[in-house]
Image (cartoon, rainbow, N blue to C red):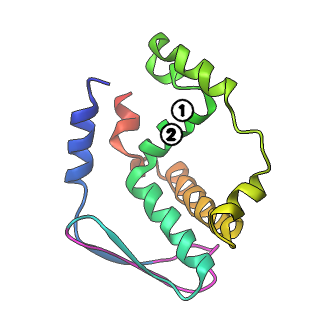
Amino acid sequence: MKYLPCLLLLFAIGCKNSKNTLNVAELQQPVEILRDSAGVNHIYAQNEHDLFFAQGYAAAKDRLFQFEIWRRQATGTVAELLGEAEVKRDIGARLFKFRGDLKKEFNHYHPHGEAIITAFTKGINAYIRETEKNPDLLPIEFKLL
């Protein structure tokens, strides 16, 4: 974790103003994403599915490495990446793994929770598919580790 400040600096440098129309097959209608000077995405969509799909896509584009760390923390696989010092954390994560009804959990947060989270996740996966086709899209953090 001694490289964390450097990784955060690289992320901050990557933030810039931009405007683009998202063209992904899973969208029902065109979506526009505007990124302001603070790196905040402003998403304009015509329906809920496309809004959360675009949010997931944009979040993955900005934070794919962070998502990978969170995924590893949740699944107890951080030690595979960062070494033996993380084994105790991984054991705890595996012991306390969520085993409840996910649909009920999602809908606890919002009446459309399952649909929102599914669309968000599909957006993340769409961006991951793009990185598989073009590895240059991967954040530099993946190359550093």
User: Depth check: 32 or 85 in front?
Assistant: 85
Q: Is residue 95 above or below residue 102?
A: above
Q: Is residue 80 above or below residue 122?
A: above
Numbered badge on residue 70:
2
Q: Label 1, on which residue?
A: 73
Residue 35 x, y percent position in the rendering: 30, 72
> Which amino acid is tagged 1?
Gln
Q: Is residue 85 above or below residue 125?
A: above
Q: Is 41 positioned to the left or the right of 128 in the image?
A: left
Tell me the CA gap for discs 2 and 1: 5 Å
Q: Is residue 139 above or below residue 123?
A: above
Residue 97 x, y percent position in the rendering: 69, 33
Contact (CB < 8 A) between labels 2 and 1? yes
Q: Residue at x 51, y 71 (%)?
A: 54
Q: Residue at x 58, y 64 (%)?
A: 120
Q: Mark 1 packing: few (<14 Cα in 10 Å), some, or many (20+)?
A: some
Q: SS for tag 1? A: helix
Which residue is at the far right? 101
Q: Quadrant of residue 5?
A: top left
Residue 111 x, y percent position in the rendering: 69, 72
> Which amino acid is tagged 2?
Trp
Residue range corresponding to the magenta coloring: 22-37
